[in-house]
Amino acid sequence: MSERLTALGQLLQLSILLNEDMTQALGKLGLTTSRTHLLWELQQNGPATQRDLAQALKVSARNITGLVDGLVSTGFVTREPHPTDRRATLVSFTEHGADVMAQMAKDHKHLADMLFGGLPELDGFIKNMDHVLAQLQKAIEEEAGK
């Protein structure tokens, strides 16, 4: 098998393993990938309107409503009146949601340390992954444009 096919196989295996690990960890918290994506958006950018969240996650307003409803009912976020736009509401973390996201950030650091702590030439690995990701993104965009 060529080295390129071997590398692709390893990337696919890595993707599968990371997905399985993430699904298990999120399931223990009562979260789905989509709900967690919304939580990460709040973690990165702070409280947001549902419209802003829909744009950031590239989903419909209807999908965001369902995601936020689920996160409100499970205690991760709350809806509060927007301070300057009385027609809008802000989605914000509850204390529980903020605590879970803080723990998730710690868990990510631990995983990064475990996976890459002893890796020689980490800078080279990062540059190579940047190249692979850019090539994949380009291919996806070209396919979408067809």
Image: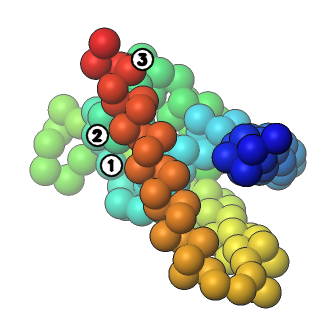
Q: Earlier in the sequence, mark 1 or mark 3?
A: 1
Write the residue at 70% across / 37% down: 32
Write the residue at 41% across / 50% down: 134
Q: CA distance from mark 3 to mark 2?
A: 13 Å
Given residues 41 and 129, the one toward you in this image is: 129
Callout 1: helix, strand or loop? strand
Reading the image, the residue beneath label 3 is 62
Q: What's the amino acid at mark 2? A: Asp
Q: Which mark is residue 71?
A: none
Q: What's the amino acid at mark 1? A: Ala
Which quadrant: the C terminus?
A: top left
Q: CA distance from mark 2 to mark 1?
A: 6 Å
The reply to whether dot 1 and dot 3 touch (C-beta < 8 Å) is: no
Reading the image, the residue beneath label 1 is 48
Could you say where residue 43 lies in the image, as x and y percent from the top left? 47, 61
Callout 3: helix, strand or loop? helix
Horizontal side of residue 122 vs 19, given as left or right:
left
Q: CA distance from mark 1 to mark 3?
A: 16 Å
Could you say where residue 26 lies in the image, as x and y percent from the top left? 77, 47
Q: Which mark is residue 52?
A: 2
Q: Quadrant of residue 135?
A: top left
